[in-house]
Image (spheres, rainbow, N blue to C red):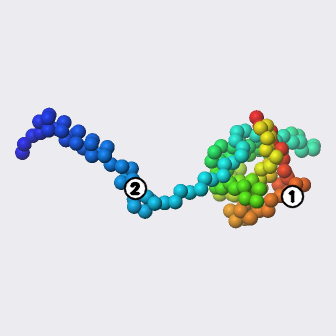
Amino acid sequence: MKTLNLKHLTFLVIMSGMLFISCKKDDLQPEDTKNETPQPAKAKVPVSGHYLWEFEIPGIGNQESHLTFYTDSVQYIMTGPAYNTNYMMIQESYSEANDQKRWIGIGKGGSISKDGVYFVMFFKDITDNSVTIYKHECDGGREEAESFPYPDPDATADHGWNVYYKK
């Protein structure tokens, strides 16, 4: 068996590099993905960062509700003498159909487990410093989150609409 000398080895390395460089990305894609129709852009959630709603429970004390919005999830923290919890909600969808800003997510983890629990939130009156939010935990899963009606302005269920201030 012949051994390769340095010239032959260098030639093989250069040629294999040229073959790799000459391939186009389209040549590497499966045939059925070359002609896909571009997907429409998803609506972007109109808030980001940390927001706080503070309220008092008569005879018990002050509670704080914190929502921190990330690009793909929302962290929820409630602190105070009446109730404490901390969990994530992973975004599944966001739409602005019928002028209703509807966010749907599924719970993950938490000091009181929210694994697999669906949530729907609605947003209105968005400014640089605040947003009014209605948050509902859905016992009926995703179907309930998708069909939950837009809350009336004076709704009291689920603590109603609440003004959260940007921190």
Label 1's element? loop
Residue beneath disc 1: 152
Give the position of the C terminus as an image quadrant.
Answer: top right
Residues 80 and 27: in front is 27
Tell me which amino acid carries mark 1.
Asp
- Report the side of 7 relative to 108 (left or right): left
- Report the side of 65 relative to 18 (left or right): right
Q: Position of residue 90 (x, y in %)?
A: 64, 51
Quadrant of the image occupied by residue 129:
top right
- Report the side of 146 relative to 31 (left or right): right
Residues 20 and 133: in front is 20
CA distance for labels 2 and 1? 50 Å
Label 2's element? loop
> Residue at coordinates 77% horizontally, 62% vertically from top-left?
148
Q: Position of residue 130 (x, y in %)?
A: 80, 40
Quadrant of the image occupied by residue 65:
top right
- Report the side of 79 relative to 22 (left or right): right
